Amino acid sequence: MGRQHVTGNRQQATGYMLFFACSLWLVACSYCCFAQPISSTELIKNAKEYDGKRVVYQGEVIGDVMVRRYSAWLNLSDGENTVGVWVRKELLPQIEYVGSYLQKGDTLEIEGVFQASCPQHGGDLDIHAEKVKILARGYKIEEKISPLKQRWARNLSLSAALLFACFFIREKRNRWKRRLKI
Amino acid sequence: MLLRPRYEDIAVIAYHIGKIIVAVSLCLILPLLTAFVFQEKAPVFDFIIALGSSLSLGLFLMIVFKTDKELRWMHGMVIVSLAWLILAVLGAVPLYLSGHWRSFLDAVFDGMSGYTTTGLTLVQDLDHLSMSHQMWRHLIMFIGGQGIVIVALGFLTRGAGGAFKIYVGEARDERILPNVVQTARFIWTISIVYLVVGTLLLGGIAVLEGMPPLRAFFHGAWIFMAAYDTGGFAPQSQNILYYHSFLFELATIMIMFLGIINFKLHFTLWTGNRREFWRDIEIITLSSTIIFTFLFVAAGLAKADVYPQAVGLFRKGFYQLISAHTGTGYMTLYASQLTQFWPALALVGLIVAMGLGGAMCSTTGGIKALRVGLVFKAFIQDVKQLMQPETAVLVEKFHHIKDLILEDRQLRSAALIFLAYLGLFLLGSIAGMACGYPFLDSLFESASAGANVGLSCGITSASMPAALKLVYIFQMWLGRLEFVAVFTLIGFIMAMAKGK
């Protein structure tokens, strides 16, 4: 009887443990799902749903890092849209490359609070970063010049020069003719 | 009976188009220099190809069709309408060669959008576009805003013979100075002075907001060009939102206002007559319509609680409204936000503002304040007339640079253009709906293209149907030239085909 009671207690404890473990796993799962990066299109389309929530967003740093006193603005492009990210200076990593014509910018992952209409920034749609991580360094982009373009550039320059010479000679000749008539 | 145009008519048209092409193509030297300064090798070839092809075509027309024949009104109109089409195609060449436009049609769309100061764009990956191509995009907006004929008149023409007939074709029928070439040079002088001041102002703000000085200077110049010429192109894909700056927004609002003022009023202000500003019918009409349309936008946004704070509502609502009313098209939000979160009432406010536009003889599009003011005055006059004895004759006056009497002739012309714009907006809306877009979105995008505004609710994209791209190109062209020149061209083509 006593042994049965002990066994029953053990089973109950195991049940509780299992339930607790499952709950923990579910919470962890939901946290992991939430920690998945969200695309800019998803954020902009469902701005009301994500408003005030923590989100993870990845993108290339575009244009400039605009430092404003104790914080800075970064604009991160995920290839679909570019979203403004407000970062405190102490969180700001060393950005080596920003996206431009001859550069692929550093790719960052940021975690922060999404604002559909930011009260601090005049209603802007932005993210206030709380964690910033560099995912990949940017690089310089090599320019490729097509030989066909070079050929066309040469031929068209030549044609414009020839036509200009024709035009110039004719104008001169006409001017001389007019002077001779006078 | 239609008279078939003779060879001399074609020669006059072709010769002057050649001249305009040469004048405008010389502007390609600026982006070419930019490419050299920033050591962008590939764009150098893009601009040499564009310069070579434009100069070759222009010089060829000038050599083959050389003529001293006097211009007639019909010639002026056909020259202008054809020149704008040809320049949009030629201007698209360096854009297409950059590889940032999916097709040549997309590049032509941006070329037309730039010259007509519309601001709708089909560019891909704008954030990685070269500095020299950015320079060209914004420069075509500046050239188009001033008027391509003004460019040709300012640099290439010594005499004024017949020049006024081309100048009028560009929807500018107000002569500021007695000589049209002097008028063109005055327009250039004030624009260059404003360009210098505006670039320093915007560049200075950009430096204060954390941008490096060189980039700040170029961004300042480009944003000024597009804001003053009520264009709407911006060097970054986020448009004005990129700068995250209230000061920048304030400065661009001021510049957009400068852009919608009649050049004739600029002249009177420059000559020290400041009182004139508040007396002019266009300024009174503009102030009233801005307040009226903002009430729509603010009421819509407040009711839908899009921006819970008043500052957000004002910054977003007022900026988008001013951008729409001035025909600029600058945005401080994402295009899809307009259709998804802005209520219909606020969108209607923006559509009405886009349709109304700015002042005559300015860089803006749309119906224009003078016409709206005149139609409104005529309406009031009719109501007053009904209240008077039948024998009484009422004379309605208005002040536009000087005191004028409202005449039936002015009213007829204003009402006709008013109706033509409504027809144009309807055409684009039907085309949009035929392509499967909702009514309000189609109307919004159509008003934006037809009134040369550039605000988008998301329809304008590289993936939209080619037919719709063509309709919008046509709308931008027709809207900028205010119908008469384009209709004359259609008449000219019909006379070529069916004339005797």
Image: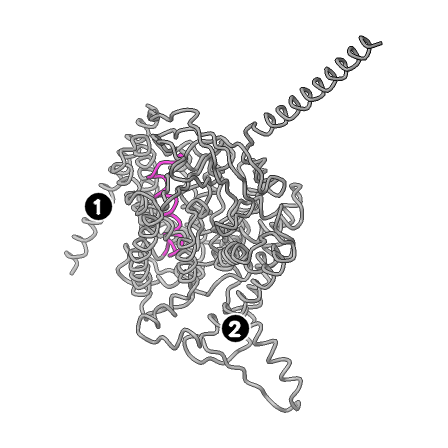
Is A177 left, or right, of A93 in this rendering?
A: left
Is B276 left, or right, of A8 in this rendering?
A: left
x then y, percent, for residue A80: 52, 34
Is B404 drawn above or below residue B3 in the view shown?
below
x then y, percent, for residue B256: 43, 58
Label 2 crowd bin: few (<14), some (14–19), many (20+), radius 10 Å: some
Is B499 drawn above or below residue A100 in the view shown?
below
Q: Disc 2 sits on a residue from what chain?
A: B
x then y, percent, for residue A37: 54, 29
Task: Say whether marks 2 and 1 touch (CB < 8 Å).
Answer: no
Q: Please state which of the two labelled residues, at mark 2 or mark 1, is closer to the viewer.
A: 2
Magenta segment's dominant SS is: helix
Mark number displayed over residue B410: 2
* Residue B482 seen in render: no
Residue sitting nearer the eye, B379 or A76? A76
Residue sitting nearer the eye, B9 or B34? B34
State which quadrant residue B68 falls in.
bottom left
**Residue positioned 35% across, 62% down in the render:** B162
Q: Disc 1 sits on a residue from what chain?
A: A
Identify residue type, mark 1.
Phe
Q: Which residue is mark 1?
A: A168
* Residue A22 seen in render: yes
x then y, percent, for residue B91: 39, 42
The magenta stretch is B128-149
Identify residue type, mark 2.
Gln
